[in-house]
Image (cartoon, rainbow, N blue to C red):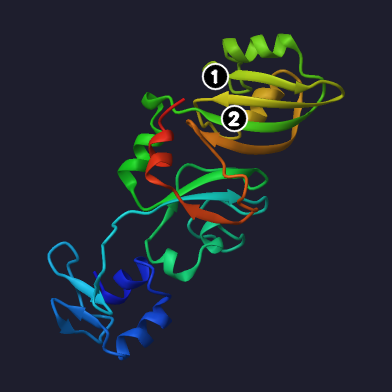
Amino acid sequence: MRLDKLLANMGHGSRKEVKKLLKTGVVRIDGVPAKDGKEQVDPEKQEVSVFGEVVLYKPFLYLMLNKPQGVISATEDEQHRTVLDLLDEGTLMYDLFPVGRLDKDTEGFLLITNDGQFSHSLMSPKKHVKKTYYAIIAGEVTDEDVQAFSDGVTLEDGYVTKPGELRILSKGTISEIELEITEGKYHQVKRMFEAVDKKVTFLKRIAIGGLVLDSTLKKGEYRELTVAEHSLLFEG
């Protein structure tokens, strides 16, 4: 991989900042000064150092993003702002993509990575990884709805969903709920409530597996997952 990409990915600044760093001569490959950011380097076979400290190569990145409404879960789009537009230049050099998707008007927990195998494993129906949502519903959610979701509801196209765990937080003409599902069909949560004659007016994903969205992350903010959090994704 390119030397400037490696250095940017490992936290040594944006590509522009890395270019300035290279000019100073403090970057070395196997002890030899390197000043050309385009130079190819194999971080698994060659030793790269900055100011005498060895750069530890990390091939994959796993980010927790608090996606705001109005942003689409895509890598590029000509008309709308994408989740990758929320990331800084150095992070973008990892060739990242969102794991699954959240609708444009849905906010909350979205994973972003460059690890295709991890993404496939997490999204595989065979893994039954649960996703937890908080929603505001127009209409009174009832115990009958809880049972219907537990049994699996029939969507407008005839598809019967897998069982979901619906919890009522507050009742009334406007209800608040939490819902755990293990699928990710198009507009699934909205369509499930439409199947019981109710409408989702606000939707936020708050957890994936056993990992809850970091409450300190403001909308549009993100951070890297810890090793422990990574394993929590497949729990619960």
Residue under the image location 65 percent in, 53 percent down: 219
Which residue in the protein does label 1 denote? 161
Compare residues 17 and 67 and report the one nearer the observer: 17
Q: Given the image, on which type of amino acid does mark 2 rest?
A: Gln
Secondary element at tag 2: helix
- The image quadrant of residue 118 is top left
Secondary element at tag 1: loop
Assess disc 1: are there few (<14), some (14-19) or many (≥20) residues with their C-alpha within 10 Å of its C-alpha. Answer: many
Which residue in the protein does label 2 denote? 188
Q: Using the image, determine if residue 108 lies above or below residue 57.
A: above
Q: Going from the N terminus, do you reach mark 2 or mark 1 first? A: 1
Quadrant (top left/top right/bottom left/bottom right) for the N terminus: bottom left
Residue under the image location 47 percent in, 31 percent down: 209
- Image location of residue 182, percent across then percent down: 49, 25
Residue under the image location 47 percent in, 25 percent down: 236
- Image location of residue 158, percent across then percent down: 57, 18
Compare residues 208 and 85 and report the one nearer the observer: 208
- Image location of residue 3, percent across then percent down: 26, 75
Compare residues 50 and 97 and report the one nearer the observer: 50
In the rendered structure, the answer to whether residue 202 lies left or right of residue 159 reads right
Residue 86's tag is: none
